Image: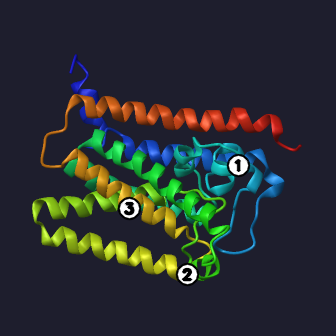
Amino acid sequence: MFGFAAAIRALGRDFGFVKLVIGGSVGLYIATLLIDPEGIRNSGLLSFMSPSVDAILIFGASGQIPVFQLERWWTLLSAGWLHGGLLHLLFNMNAVRFFAPATAELYGAGRTIIIYTVSSITGFLFSSVVYHVSLWNPLAGLLSILGLNGAHLTLGASAPISGLLGALLYYGHRTGSRAIREQILGYALGFAVMGLLMRGIVDNQAHLGGFVGGYLTARFLDPLTPERGDHLLVAVICIALTALSVIVSIVTALPHYGT
């Protein structure tokens, strides 16, 4: 590895991706608080230390409004690194610490990053499309009651985390491991129940879209084949595009902030 083998090993199995996600998410969360401190909300436990709507829009929240009304399609990438409150951030970062290393152990760091990125896109795209369609769908009221109507604004790492669950489930199917399948299905069922109990707060469609995206991406990548150099190259591109999406969000939104 051109003399970098020791440095790469020091990053761990995930090549430092978990630290990158946690560091990036925490940094962006703090930035969303600092840019509009007067708009911080503390109306309850779940909304404790919540950034203002303006702040999350500036940094790249996704959903029907940004994607379809504002045509900020790149937010499908940036939204997975933003969070709507302190508890939201802590819960998701704990899940990243748990599921990302397990996925990297089975798929390799490069393919894990690809799965994470694609799942963010599919999760937030599905949520945005469903909400957009529900605006003129006669079943919109029922979907809203069930918490399945998507979101006009959405963000959080739970969409790509759901993609990691989908990838782990596919690994269980691909290898015939009943233990892995049952464990992951248990986690998925738990998340689904929590989403139904917290409908209106949890974006169930983003979770579903992320889960399906992760499963299909894992199937395409095939965990039983060795990870290749081009997987790592694509992973670097994924990280670069995600960072660019946040930068573009800020640059395009700041001129309109406060107007």
- Residue 16 lies, with reference to residue 152, above or below; the image says above
Residue 132 appears at what percent x and percent y?
Answer: 63, 61
Q: Residue at x 52, y 51 (%)?
A: 80
Q: Which residue is mark 2?
A: 146
Q: Is residue 147 above or below residue 214?
A: below
Q: Nearer the viewer, residue 89 or 210?
A: 210
Q: Which residue is mark 1?
A: 57
SS class of the residue under badge 3?
helix
In which quadrant will I find the N terminus?
top left
Amino acid on which the number 2 mark rests in the picture: Leu
Left or right: 243 as drawn, with respect to 208: right
From mark 3 to mark 2, how far is it between C-alphas? 19 Å
**Residue at far left of view:** 176
What is the quadrant of the C terminus in the image? top right
Q: Upstream in the sequence, badge 1 or badge 3? A: 1
Determine the image quadrant of residue 85. Answer: bottom right
Within 10 angstroms of label 2, few (less than 14), some, or many (20 or more) residues? some
Q: Earlier in the sequence, mark 3 or mark 2?
A: 2
Q: Residue 155: give its label.
A: none
Task: Kindly identify the residue that appears in the image at 26 percent across and 29 percent down.
Answer: 230
Foreground: disc 1 or disc 3: 3
Callout 3: few (<14), some (14-19), or many (20+) C-alpha neighbours within 10 Å? many
**Residue type, label 3:** Phe
x then y, percent, for residue 147: 56, 76
Q: Residues within 10 Å of mark 1 (few under 14, many from 20)?
A: many
Question: What's the mark number on residue 211?
Answer: 3
Q: How many marks?
A: 3
